Amino acid sequence: MKSLALPALSTLAELGETLGSPLNLRASMREALETIVESFRASTGYVALPEGEEAELTLAAWIGASPSSAARLRIRPGEGIAGRVWKSGKSVVVPQVTKEPLFLDRLGLVSGRRPAARELSYLAVAIPVGGKPAGVLALSLPYEKERDFAGATEFLSIAASMIGQALRVSRLMETERTRLQEENRQLKEQLSERYGLPNVIGTSHPMQQVYEKVAQAAPASTTVLIQGESGTGKELVAHALHHGSPRAGRAFVKVNCAALPESLIESELFGYEPGAFTGAQALKKGRFELADGGTLFLDEVGDLSPATQVKLLRVLQEREFERLGGVRPVRVDVRLVAATNRDLSEMMGKGTFREDLFYRLNVFTIFMPPLRERKPDLPLLADHFVEKYAARHGKSVRRISTSAIDVLMSYHWPGNVRELENCLERAVLVCDGGVIHAHHLPPTLQTAEVSGTLPRQSLAEALGAFEKDLLLDALKISRGNRAQAARLLRTTERILSYRAQKLGIDATRFKG
């Protein structure tokens, strides 16, 4: 008997690569089917799968059939040849479809063709998922007498298994994505309900204490003093206090005391009357008036001059002030939130900050921990900033490698979260792939003297660690498929297996 010319093994490798990324499974199946049809020189081919919860098969991908016929096709279990394959899980070969009464020809493969070209051969194999038939892969070929289909059926069964594996991974990913989205939604709701801190990231113990204090202070109108180093997120907490309070619908007004010169700070805070000074032609409301009924945030309050401190003290005591050039007091209802990166106690001892003002501000204190004291939050923050800046700059960066996380964790972060954000924005910009590696981070983070990471390994150990990182990354991406991992690293499966065994890496633990 004449045997059917089989596709080369490279075709299976091509199918594996096509189906290896099941993020868009329909497109992957269409591309895989094109490869199969072309390799067999088939007339038509299709992949039929259940649609949702329906107990019928519909065409997920097809080649050589009219779109209208393909869209209408429905296959019930046991109906026709494809239905029997789906129900039994056994492959079927029909050498001559015109002599097979079970061949229903709903796609019009035979009808309408010239008599001389009407005869076709038909092969259908089950697509297995989890040990059960979950669909059908079918081909129709020009009829040739005395053709042996055994090898072709075996090849198609392997291709169907690969499609089934991709389908299984896609379903698992969709289930996991749905679960994570629901879990994320519930966690955000809980966080919002309890803390009102949607923009503050961190689950470490120091941050839990911050959330607790915000939850206690937000509903009241108490004056709050936020202390902490620059770049720790003091302004975010001030916003959270405002939005978690009954004043959330009113104004939130910010004043950076360090950014305004001493000659302007008073007029900015309290406003001025027309003619108060040269150029003051109209009345201007100050920040206190603009924040009436809402919250006034005084950032870097430790930079206020002694003269302004006196006037601020009066507002806190009397809840009223006078504009520059004015004689009538202006009453306001303002909740004051102040922040500083200075040690106000030390400044009081030196006489540069008023003691009575300190006690007025220090009614309820929230301390923002530096990043070096909340290192468990660093991976969460890093992922957040990578996602944020990848979207902003149109980059396809999706994650941070283990080696890069190790560099971030070993650094002491004098600039705190602000410095981390800047570093990761730079890393996203210079990254030329989907993963940020250690060499994408700023050089200051990678300097041993700065980060306190002087080498404690020999050259051989360091090279081994780097090789292990590459192997782990490749096996994670390929979900334990050593052949695919070898292709990613441009080596052979034999060499990869040897190196993995030598480095103590078990590839099977990455299989989905």
Image (tube, rainbow, N blue to C red):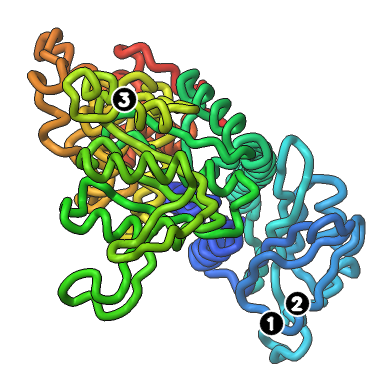
Q: Is residue 276 above or below residue 16?
A: below
Marks 3 and 2, the one that precedes in the sequence: 2
**The N terminus lies in which quarter of the figure?**
bottom right
Near mark 1 (Cα within 10 A), the count class, few <14, some 14-19 or many ≥20, is: few
Q: Quadrant of residue 186?
A: top right
Question: Is residue 174 found left or right of 83 in the rendered image?
Answer: left
Rendering coords of residue 100 (x, y %): 85, 68
The residue that mark 2 highlights is: 71
Q: CA distance from mark 3 to mark 2?
A: 80 Å
Q: SS at mark 2?
A: helix
Asked if the residue at tag 1 contacts the one at tag 2, i.e. Cβ–Cβ closer than 8 Å, the answer is yes
Badge 1 is on which residue?
A: 67
Question: Is residue 375 positioned above or below 317 on the image?
Answer: above
Mark 2 belongs to which amino acid? Ala
Q: Is residue 151 left or right of residue 73?
A: left
Q: Are marks 1 and 3 in contact (CB under 8 Å)?
A: no
Quadrant of the rendered image containing residue 98: bottom right
* In the rendered image, the vertical position of residue 117 relative to residue 465, given as above or below: below
Q: Residue at x 60, y 62 (%)?
A: 26
* Disc 1 versus disc 3: nearer the observer: 3
Q: Amino acid at mark 3?
A: Glu
Real-space Cα separation, disc 1 to disc 3, in angstroms: 82 Å
Q: Position of residue 323 (x, y in %)?
A: 34, 61
